[in-house]
Image (cartoon, rainbow, N blue to C red):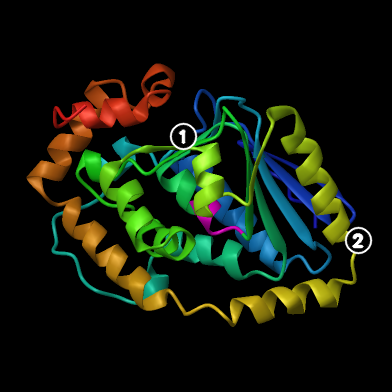
Amino acid sequence: MAYEGYQRLRIAREGRLVTATIDNPPINLITLELYGELARLAQELEADREAQVFVLKSANPDFFMAHFDVEAILSMPTDSPPERGAWDANTWHVMCERFRTMDKVTIAQIEGRVGGGGAEISASFDMRFGALGRTIINQMEVPVGILPGGTGTQRLPRLLGRGRAMEVILGGIDLDAETAERWGWLNRALPPSQVGPFVDALARRIAGFPPQAVRLAKRAMLAAEPSPHEGLAEESFLFQQLIRTDDGRRAMRRFLELGGQTREGELKVAELSGAISGVG
């Protein structure tokens, strides 16, 4: 499989190992264009019978991947009431579930900030590795009047436990790499110089093992997990409710006015999002 035509992802292949590097300056914001490429990549990877391991990393040392474009959220149609539907009516959920369930090992190499939808995609991967002093995770949706609608409300309680997920989501806090490792969001938090070499060695090691053993071992572990599909459908419905509220739309606009989606604002996104309601 050639993996051609990508503009915001740089795709490299070496044997059974496929690597994608996100390059969408200045902060790897998930624009509609980047989202489209990520969704297409998930489909191509799922169909690639030769690939065994997939690594996602960033060309930007400060940002792995930011949240979904708030301007795009504000432009979503809201002239009809939200309706409950099947989980797979939400194309974002379908993309994340592909990364979670495909018969490839998915690894996120997170060496900078990751937030919102970027954190949700990462949480759908099989493994996540971060850099001490550099990796910071943030779910900034509640401070801007919405909720993590891209699987976050379903992934985080499973990864962190209910109480810690509540702290991250409702508090809109920055989670540093050391805490994220201790809480289970990261597999390991390593010195910055060691993250790349460690992930590369692990990915190549797994890519060298018998393909059926790797694929069926992952399938067996997935069978140990409860299905998130009912919860994803509810998350999607509640997200649709919130983007129709005056408070939510007002908070999202205020986030942009205060510097959201600029490099300077996103480097202090917990402080910035707290300022929307004057809570610091």
User: Dividing the image into 4 quarters, which one contains the C terminus?
Assistant: top left
Residue 227 lies, with reference to residue 106, above or below; the image says below
Dividing the picture into quadrants, the one containing residue 10 is top right
Magenta-drawn stretch contains 182: no
Measuring 76% from the left and 65% from the top, which residue is drawn there?
48
The majority secondary structure of the magenta stretch comes to: helix
Picture quadrant of residue 15: bottom right
Cα distance, mark 1 to mark 2? 34 Å
Write down the residue under mark 2: 208
Task: Tell me which residue sits at (26%, 31%) in the image.
Answer: 273
Sequence-wise, the earlier of marks 1 and 2 is: 1
Q: Is residue 22 left or right of residue 248?
A: right
Is 122 part of what is drawn in magenta?
yes
Give amino acid for label 1.
Leu
Magenta residue span: 121-125
Q: Residue furthest top?
A: 264
Position of 158 with respect to 45 (left or right) is left
64 vs 159, left or right, is: right
Circle 2: residue type: Gly
Q: Where residue 29 is drawn, which disc sits there?
A: 1
Looking at the image, is mark 1 or mark 2 nearer the viewer? Answer: 2
Q: Within 10 angstroms of label 2, few (less than 14), some, or many (20 or more) residues?
A: some
Mark 1, secondary structure of its residue: loop
Residue sitting nearer the eye, 48 or 271: 271
Residue 12, can we see it?
no
* Percent of width and height locating residue 271: 30, 26
Residue found at x 71% / y 68% = 47
Q: Position of residue 32 (x, y in %)?
A: 44, 43
